[in-house]
Amino acid sequence: MNRPIPMPNRVSTPCIGVCALDADGHRCLGCGRTLEEIGAWPSLDETARRAIMNRLARQNRRESRSRVSQSRESAR
């Protein structure tokens, strides 16, 4: 009897397919991960991946608020 082969769960990733490094060459401008995080990604478990993705989300929110604040100040 042939049993169906279970498909692996989709791997969580913040990658948006815009892979370019910042001016220092340490962080991806697309997803925000460091080179170390990108290199380690395949060996990280889902908990570690989620922790990085949560940090990236918090970082993005802070940067967005900062840009809005700067924009408002320059409009004055």
Image: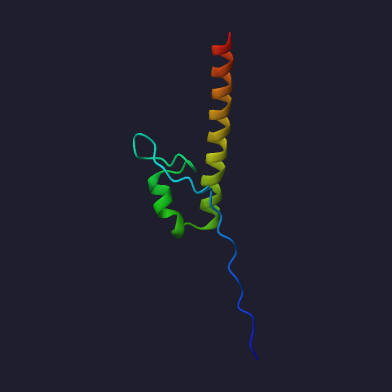
> Does residue 70 sit above or below 56 in this rendering?
above
Outermost residue, left side: 24
Identify which residue, 38 or 15, lies in the foreground. Answer: 15
Identify which residue, 55 or 67, lies in the foreground. Answer: 67
Outermost residue, top side: 76
Left or right of residue 52: residue 24: left
Q: Position of residue 39 (x, y in %)?
A: 39, 53
- Quadrant for the N terminus, please: bottom right
Q: Position of residue 49 (x, y in %)?
A: 52, 51
At a point 55% along the width and 34% down the height, the residue shown is: 60
Q: Position of residue 11 (x, y in %)?
A: 55, 59
> Does residue 71 sit above or below 5 in this rendering?
above
Left or right of residue 74: residue 1: right
At a point 36% along the width and 34% down the height, the residue shown is: 23
Which quadrant of the figure has residue 62? top right
Figure disc tally: 0
Q: Where is residue 13 in the image (x, y as percent from the top left)?
A: 53, 52
At a point 63% along the width and 88% down the height, the residue shown is: 2
- Quadrant for the C terminus, please: top right
> Does residue 22 sit above or below 46 in this rendering?
above
Question: According to the image, what is the colour scheme of the structure?
Answer: rainbow
> Does residue 71 sit above or below 28 in this rendering?
above
